[in-house]
Amino acid sequence: IGSGTGILSRLFLDFGCHVFGVEPNADMRAAAERLLAGEPRFHSVDGRAEATTLPTASVDFVTAGQSFHWFDPVAARGEFRRILRPVGWVVPIWNERLVTPGFLTEYEDLLQRLSTDYGSVDHRQVGAEAINRFFAHRQWRFAAFPNHQDFDWDGLRGRLLSSSYAPLPGSPKYQPMMDELASIFAAHQQAGQVKMVCETRVYVGQIGA
């Protein structure tokens, strides 16, 4: 759900699953269709968490990679309950960027000051109580795994500009953000790269009554 450009879908396809990639954004959906062209087990779906268009009791797992914060939790829970088989599971997954001294502290400060709506989409705002409310119980499970990405300048710039909270060209915040990002990269790069340290957070549970 919120399958985007198909990165998480690719992993499930490699595992042998049939995947219905539900994505409301036409450009992202098209990117996934290009990435996964020729995959007979991938089905691209124009839908959203609250209205997937999938048949009732048709799936074993509902997953959401880096998209849970967009959902209306009550409406999504009802829709997931509808499309899941009786023993189906919901598995929200996201990478949470750590704020460690140096590059990541300065990068976080940049986002806080110059992004458009970073605070409203920051997964760190999703705590245990929000997960309790979503599942309608406390018997879900949680696991975390260390993760990181190494970026050169083009990769770091592209990473930021691909985020929904990045100001668009022409915005008064766009050029100041790009200039400061370049300064941060220059100050902290080693051998032309910086490291973005994350924690992959996985929540697993069944929808309560």
Image (tube, helix red, strand yellow):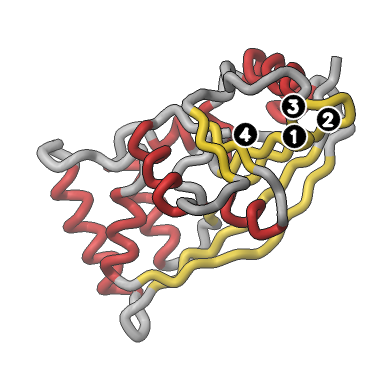
- Going by the numbered disc 1, the residue's amino acid type is Val
Tell me the residue that label 2 is attached to.
206
Q: Amino acid at mark 2?
A: Gln
Give the residue at mark 3: 58
Name the residue that disc number 1 marks.
90
Q: Say which label, 3 or 1, has the lower sequence index.
A: 3
Q: Earlier in the sequence, mark 1 or mark 4?
A: 1
- The Cα–Cα distance between marks 3 and 2, rounded to whole angstroms, is 15 Å
Q: Which mark is residue 126?
A: 4
N-terminal label among 2 and 1: 1
Q: Is residue 148 above or below residue 28?
A: below
Mark closest to the chain's N terminus, 3 or 2: 3
Check disc 3 and give the amino acid type.
Ser
Residue drawn where x is 57% and y is 54% of the image? 10
- Whether residue 193 sits left or right of residue 148 in the image: it is left
Q: Residue furthest bottom?
A: 191
Separation of marks 3 and 1 at Cα, in angstroms: 13 Å
Residue at image coords 51%, 24%: 47
The residue closer to the viewer here, 9 or 183, is 9
Distance between the Cα atoms at labels 1 and 4? 16 Å
Q: Residues within 10 Å of mark 1 (few under 14, many from 20)?
A: many
- The image quarter in which residue 207 lies: top right
Answer whether labels 3 and 2 touch (C-beta < 8 Å).
no
Q: Position of residue 66 (x, y in %)?
A: 55, 42
Quadrant of residue 105 within the rendered picture: bottom left
Q: Residues within 10 Å of mark 2 (few under 14, many from 20)?
A: many
